[in-house]
Structures are given as C-alpha cells and as structure tokens.
C-alpha cells in the first residue's frame, strides 16, 4: 500500500514537473510570438533601373533607421520601364498577409491612385514621396488627411531648386573656364529623367531658370531618359554630335551624369576642362566622382530625409503624430555638393549608417520637443554618440 | 469530232462572245482606269496623312532621340498603302546622316517625298532633319492586275456560260429547226415536189400562238404546193414543145435531104447536058466548075441531114470528102495529085461552112488546073485549124510550078482567085493571103463568130 502510494506520489510529481516544464516552454514560445507580432512592418515601394546605385543607398539608410527603431522594413522595387506592373504587384503586396503596418510609396505617373486606394482600404497609414503631377495630387485630394484618411504624409524635395542649383554651378564653371561656343555662348544641354515622374519636369524647369539667369548661356535642348547611365552616355554622344560646341551637360541624376562623363571621355573631351556635368542625387557615387574630378557638382536633399520619414512613421504608429509639428506636407531642403563640399557630404553619408535613430524619435525621447534633422544636429548627435562610445 | 465553223450556231456563239468580250474589256479597262486614279488620289491622301500625323511626332522623336518611338512611327508609315521605304535623315552642321530606315530602299518607279522635320523647342522652330518616304504604285499595279485578272476570269466564265446558254436555247428554238428546214429542202425531189410537207418537231403548237418558224413552215408548204402545180404545168408545156421540136427537126432534115437530092439532080442534069458538048472544053470546064460548087453545097446539106445538130456540120469529114470528090472529079486523085488533109475537129455553122466549101472548091480547082502542067505530079495539102480563140485558117497549098515573081492575084484574070477573094472578104469577113514561090499557098483567115446560130 505504501509502495503504491509512493509510486503514485512519484508519478504525480513527475507529471507535475513535466507539466511545469511544458508550461514554461509554452509560455516562453507564446511570449516570443507576441513580440514578433508586435514588431511593426514597414513596406517601401521604390522605383529602380538596371544597375541603379541611388536607391540601394536610400534603402540602406532606411534599413538602418528601421533597425534602430525595431521595426521590420521590406523594400519592393519596380522597374521604371514597367509602370503597370508596379500598380498590380504593389496592390498584391499590400494585400498579402500579414499586411504592413505602414507604407511609403515613391511613384511615377498613374501609380499613386491604385496603391493609395488599396492601402486606404486596408487601413494602412502611408507616406507618398512626391512630387506628384498636379492632376494626380488633385485626384487624391491635394494634400494628405483630407480626402484619404490613411494618407498621413507627403514629402518631396525641391526639385526645381535642385535643377537650378546644378545648372547654375555648371554654367558658372563653364564661364570660369571660358568654354564658349563660336557665337560666344555657353551651350547647355540637359539629359533629363523619365518624364513619367513629375520631378523630372521640375528639375528641367530649374535648369531653365538657371540658364535664364545667364545671358551667355543658351539651352540647346533637353532629352528624356529612363535614368540609366548607358542612356546618359548615348544621349550625350548624340547631343554632342548635334551640338559639337556643348560645354555644359546637365544631368537629372548622378548616374546619368556618370554616363555623360563616359560620353565626354569617349569623344576625347576632358570633363571639368572642356565640358562640365553634374547630377542631382547627392549620392555616394556622385560625390566620389566630384572628388575624382569628373563631376562638377551634385544637388539634392541628403539621404537622411528617408530615415526622417521612417522615424515619423514609427512615431505615428506609436501614437505620436509628426504632423502636429512638421505638417503633413514636407518639403525637404536641398544642398549642392561641389569640390569644396563633397568630402563633407561623403562623411555625412557614412555617418548616417552609424547613427542611432532612436535619438530622433519622440517616442523614444519623451523630452524631445521638436524633430531636428538639420545637418548641424546630426553632427552633434554623431559627436555625442562617438564620445559615448569612447 | 470536227468543229463545223460554218454553222449559224457557231457564228452566233462567236458573235455573242465577241460582243461580250468587247463590252467586258471596255468595262474592265474603265474599272482599271478608275482604280488607278483612286490609287493616285489615295497616294496623295497618304502623303497628306504622313505630313499631318507622323511628321510632327517623328520630329519630336528625332529631337529627343527617342529611337523606340521613331521605330514605331517608321513601322507605322511602312504599313501605310504605297509606302515602300522610309528613312529619317538628321541634319548636322557639316553633313546629313541617315538615322533610321525601314523597308526596301531599291524601289522601281518609286517617287520620293521629303518632309522637313521641324520641332519647336523653347519657342524656337528648329529644322533638325527630314523624313524621306519612297512611294510607288507597284502595289496599286499589283492590286489592279489582281482585280483585273479576277474580273477577266469571272467575265470569261460568265461570257462562256452565257454563250453556252444562249446557244443551247437558240439551238433548241431556232437552229435545229433551220437545219431541219435545210435538210427538208435538200431532200425535195422536183419530180414529186408536192408529195412532201414540212413539219418541224415543235410540241404544243395547238396551245401556243404561231411564231416566225410556224409562218416559215406554212409559207414553205404553200410554196411547195404552188411549185408542184407550176411544175406540172411546165411538164405539159415541155412535152408539147418537145413534140413540136421533133416535128420541126424532122421537117428540117427532110428539107436538107430534099435540097441535097435536088442538088444531086441538078448535077446529074448538068453532067448529062455537058456530055452533049464534051468537045467544047470551055463549056465542059464551066459545067465542071459549077458542078463542083453545087457539090460543095450538096455535101453540106447531106451532112446536115445526117446530123442531130441542124445548124452545124463537122468540118473534118466535110473538108475531107469535098477535097477527095473534087480531085476525083478532075480524075487526078492519087494519080497525078496526092492530097494531104489536116482538119481540126470543129463544128461550124452552115453560114460559115458553105463559103468555106466554096472557097475550097475554087482553090483546089486552081491547083489542079495550074500547079501541075503536063505530066507533073504533086501534092496538094488542105488544112483547117484554129489559130486563135475566134480565128480559123483554111489553107490550100501545092508543090507545083508556082507563079511568077510579079504575080498579083488581085490583078490576075483567073476567075477562081477573084471568087475566092470575094468569098473570103464578103462572106467570111476574112482575109486572103497568097504565096507563090515553090508552089502556091492560099490561106483564108476568118472568124467563126460572124454568124449567129439560127436554129
């Protein structure tokens, strides 16, 4: 009887232990799942082209910010040559489970509406990177949070200003080197971007504004491209064949500018001596080309704006609305990098990857009264973080 | 089966086909001209369309180096009618360069149209190149030839079908009846012309109104009945005439026979009377000459009596018999004089034959009397033959002593030659020729058409 009792107690004890062990394991597993479920997802839709280097840089800094903030980020790239795929595939991706908690759309003509409608239907808050064509913007209600409630933010660079700054820099450089045509003018040509993106038109508008400021400058023509360096090269060769006295070839992106450089070198011209070119991305390849003396300048907002948008979205998901301070439409400041500032921007770009972006989040910094993404502030934070490490 | 091209049906088919082909050819030609003109007009429309629709887009495409768009536009132009080749030429400062081309550049009979490519940029028009388009009517021609071929084939089939149909209908309605009529008419026996009636194999005559063929049938049958009556009457008349003719022939033969007998009687009387004055050589000679002349006429009547033809006599037998009789009368035949007679077969009217015989009597008499004096023997040749279509020659020649060189037969006192000349010229309407060396040869050339047949 005792033996039976002891065995019964042993069995119960063993069963209790097994129960406790499984309970702990089960509890632990459930906790992990809950943690994963809580990690928010950000879907980013961007264009791309073959051999593109600009968007990977953008993705890197967004990814760095997302990692710092503890959210999942996925990038969905669509070739600019196939605008229709982006609409269909984008909508499919948004509908795929688990649906993203937030999204950023960088879109060309005709792509915004279906993506926006899909995201709004799924109740996904999203940012649109502009600029959008005016009629498209009007179709969406002109501004976020008006017609479409989940459209929480619209950001874009000052594309006209970018084009203008680069144009002016190139013309001045040509004048400084006295690269005048037989008629005494500086002949300017533009290798533009894809006209299906409204920003391309604005960039060229900036170029025209710059040319208009210089009586000695003459805009021969601009040509559209799909952003690839090979197109930059081909178009430049043909422009030079048509206008042999060209001395300024304005390019709508850094990669196009590198194609222009190739073309100049192909026909025996020395960049920065006989003809001058530059891009509009403030990308690493562009900045390095300036350092190497083949590009004159590159103009754009810094890549930080993309990290800035990630921070805003993150805070928004946590219940802190960036629009209270920044507004729903954000127009970012643009910078011109030339020989004198190229190094600074290169260092800045490299610095982004080492920043802790939680320092810019109001959610993580309850005492933060306003968002500050100025270069000065970044430098300060970078210095503080460097000091803290040491 | 041999095609009979001489039939009405064949000619009918040929006429239908000829007229149809002529109409069809004219219609096809007209259609071809219309199509050709439309092709020319369509070409102008295509040029206008290129200028309005394609050139501005191509100018923009060239200006912006949009090769993809240019290729699409060029391909689009090439799909337009009449376009064979197109190229885009860009103008540079020192040269023109062909940027793009589509189609076959080698175009036969192609016309090149050049469109300046002007693009307005920044408020300024820039001529940056030109579009060259080569058009040709080759496709129009091909299309035209295809259409005409189809039309011609269709027309030929229609014409042949229509002609065949018409011929079948015409054969059944007309030609076979005409052939039947022809066969009927050929089968008619004049001896029994009223025994047959024409009947055409056409059904339902009782139900339909008489048409032309019925009228022809009726007319032919009526005509045959009348013809039968007329032939019957003619037969009676002919019979009467034949009886009358036989009677006339008998009477005439009897007349010739009696005339000849009378002449023989006259000759006998003459000879009996001459025998009484035989010692008077001149009278005897005169009687013999007259006898010979009567002989010549009597022989003619003798020949007519024995002949079926009562107005002509065969000259061969007549001349031979007359010659031999005369020489016999002079008792020289085959003794002193040999006769050689050559006469072509010919039958002359008695109006010609009698003068011929009279002349022959005179010439033979002369030869007997004068050609062979003394015991001289010789040959007399008598010939009568045709020397031309209507001309005959009667000649009498001998190998006797002949005449003196200065002998003129017209001045000679010999009665015989005067008589011969008179007969030759007045009765025969001919000419007398005389040759006197190495014997004598007298020829009379005369026509046998001077008299008409009277019986």
Image (cartoon, coloured by chain):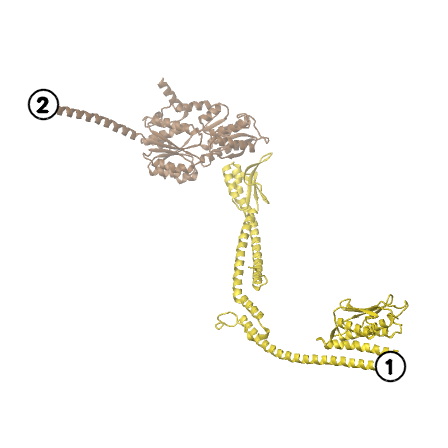
Chain colours: A brown, B yellow
Nearer the observer, B41 or B293 = B293
The image quadrant of residue A352 is: top left
> Can the viewer see residue A213 in this picture?
no
Closer to the camera, B400 or B349?
B400
- Work out which quarter of the rendered image holds the C terminus of chain B and state it: bottom right
Counting labels gives 2
In the rendered view, would you say B26 is above or below B298?
Answer: above
Asked whether the residues under the numbered discs 1 and 2 touch, taking CB atoms below 8 Å apart as contact, a structural biologist would say no
Q: In this view, does A289 lie above or below B415?
A: above
Of helix, strand and loop, which one carries label 1? loop
Q: Which residue in the structure is indicated by mark 2? A: A2
Mark 1 vs mark 2: give the one in front: 1
Q: Does residue B7 appear left or right of residue B388 in this picture?
A: left
Nearer-the-camera pick, B165 or B178? B178
Which quarter of the figure has residue A106?
A: top left
Find the distance from the CA under tag 1 to the CA under tag 2: 228 Å
Chain for disc number 2: A
Q: Give SS at disc 2.
A: helix
Dot 1: few (<14), some (14–19), or many (≥20) neighbours within 10 Å?
A: few
User: x, y (%) of residue B351?
Assistant: 77, 75
The residue furthest top is A390
Q: Of B238 and A305, which appears nearest the observer?
A: B238
Q: Is B422 above or below relative to B83?
A: below
Residue B93 image label? none
Badge 2: residue crowd in 10 Å (few <14, some 14–19, many ≥20)? few
Image quadrant occupied by the N terminus of chain B: bottom right
Residue A300 position within the rendered picture, expressed as x and y whole percent measured from the top left: 45, 29
Kindly identify which chain the residue marked by label 1 belongs to. Answer: B
Q: Which mark is residue B277?
A: 1
């Amino acid at each position: 009887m005792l033996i039976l009792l002891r065995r019964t107690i042993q069995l119960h004890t063993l069963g209790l232990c097994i129960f406790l062990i499984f309970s702990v394991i089960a509890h632990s597993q459930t906790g992990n799942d809950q943690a994963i479920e809580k990690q928010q997802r950000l879907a980013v839709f961007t264009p791309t082209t073959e051999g593109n280097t600009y968007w990977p840089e953008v993705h890197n800094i967004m990814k760095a910010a997302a990692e710092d903030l503890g959210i999942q980020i996925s990038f969905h790239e669509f070739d600019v040559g196939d605008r229709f795929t982006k609409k269909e595939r984008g909508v499919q991706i948004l509908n795929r489970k688990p649906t993203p908690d937030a999204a950023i759309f960088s879109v060309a003509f005709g792509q915004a509406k279906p993506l926006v409608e899909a995201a709004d239907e799924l109740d996904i808050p999203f940012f649109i990177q502009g600029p959008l064509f005016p009629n498209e913007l009007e179709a969406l209600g002109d501004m976020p949070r008006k017609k479409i409630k989940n459209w929480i933010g619209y950001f874009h660079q000052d594309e006209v200003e970018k084009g203008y700054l680069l144009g002016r820099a190139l013309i001045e450089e040509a004048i400084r080197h006295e690269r005048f045509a037989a008629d005494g003018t500086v002949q300017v040509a533009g290798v533009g971007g894809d006209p299906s993106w409204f920003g391309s038109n604005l960039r060229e508008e900036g170029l025209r504004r710059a040319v208009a400021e210089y009586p000695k400058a003459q805009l021969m023509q601009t040509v559209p491209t799909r952003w690839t360096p090979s197109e930059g090269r081909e178009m430049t060769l043909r422009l030079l064949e048509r206008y042999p006295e060209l001395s300024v070839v304005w390019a709508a992106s850094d990669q196009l500018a590198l194609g222009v450089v190739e073309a100049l070198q192909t026909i025996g011209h020395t960049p920065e001596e006989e003809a001058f070119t530059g891009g509009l991305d403030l990308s690493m390849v562009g900045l390095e080309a300036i350092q190497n003396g083949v590009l004159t300048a590159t103009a754009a907002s810094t890549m930080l704006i993309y990290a800035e948008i990630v921070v805003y979205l993150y805070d928004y998901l946590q219940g802190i609305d960036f629009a209270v301070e920044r507004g729903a439409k954000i127009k970012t400041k643009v910078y011109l990098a030339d020989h004198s500032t190229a190094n600074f921007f290169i260092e800045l770009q490299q610095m982004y990857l080492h920043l802790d972006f939680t320092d810019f989040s109001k959610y993580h910094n309850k005492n933060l009264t306003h968002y500050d993404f100025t270069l000065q502030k970044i430098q300060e934070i970078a210095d503080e973080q460097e000091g803290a490490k040491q | 089966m041999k095609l009979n091209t001489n039939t009405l049906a064949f000619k009918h088919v040929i006429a239908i086909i000829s007229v149809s082909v002529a109409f069809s050819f004219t219609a096809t030609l007209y259609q071809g001209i219309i199509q050709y003109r439309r092709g020319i007009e369509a070409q102008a429309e295509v040029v206008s369309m290129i200028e309005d629709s394609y050139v501005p887009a191509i100018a923009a495409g060239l200006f912006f180096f949009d090769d993809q768009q240019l290729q699409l536009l060029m391909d689009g132009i090439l799909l337009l009618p009449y376009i064979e080749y197109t190229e885009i030429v860009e103008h540079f400062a020192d040269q023109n360069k062909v940027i793009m081309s589509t189609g076959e550049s080698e175009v036969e009979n192609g016309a090149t149209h050049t469109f300046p490519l002007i693009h307005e940029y920044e408020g300024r028009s820039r001529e940056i190149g030109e579009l060259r388009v080569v058009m040709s009517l080759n496709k129009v021609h091909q299309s035209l030839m295809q259409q005409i071929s189809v039309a011609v084939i269709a027309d030929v089939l229609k014409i042949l079908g229509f002609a065949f149909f018409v011929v079948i209908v015409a054969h059944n309605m007309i030609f076979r009846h005409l052939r039947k009529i022809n066969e009927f008419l050929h089968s008619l026996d004049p001896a029994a012309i009223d025994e047959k009636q024409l009947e055409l194999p056409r059904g339902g005559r009782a139900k339909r109104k008489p048409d032309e063929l019925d009228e022809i049938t009726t007319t032919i049958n009526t005509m045959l009945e009348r013809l039968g009556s007329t032939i019957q009457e003619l037969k009676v008349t002919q019979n009467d005439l034949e009886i009358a003719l036989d009677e006339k022939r008998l009477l005439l033969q009897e007349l010739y026979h009696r005339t000849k007998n009378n002449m023989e009687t006259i000759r006998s009387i003459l000879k009996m009377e001459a025998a009484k004055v035989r010692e008077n050589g001149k009278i005897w000679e005169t009687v013999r000459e007259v006898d010979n002349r009567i002989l010549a006429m009597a022989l003619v009547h003798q020949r007519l009596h024995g002949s079926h033809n009562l107005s002509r006599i065969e000259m061969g037998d007549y001349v031979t018999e007359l010659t031999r009789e005369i020489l016999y009368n002079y008792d020289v035949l085959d003794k002193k004089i040999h006769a050689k007679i050559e006469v072509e077969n010919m039958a002359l009217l008695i109006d010609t034959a009698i003068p011929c015989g009279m002349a022959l009597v005179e010439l033979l008499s002369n030869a007997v009397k004068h050609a062979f004096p003394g015991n001289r023997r010789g040959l007399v040749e008598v010939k009568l033959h045709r020397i031309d279509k209507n001309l005959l020659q009667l000649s009498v020649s001998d190998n006797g002593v002949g005449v003196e060189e200065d002998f003129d037969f017209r001045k000679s006192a010999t009665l015989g030659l005067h008589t011969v000349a008179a007969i030759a010229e007045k009765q025969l309407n001919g000419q007398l020729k005389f040759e006197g060396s190495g014997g004598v040869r007298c020829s009379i050339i005369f026509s046998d058409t001077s008299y008409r047949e009277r019986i």
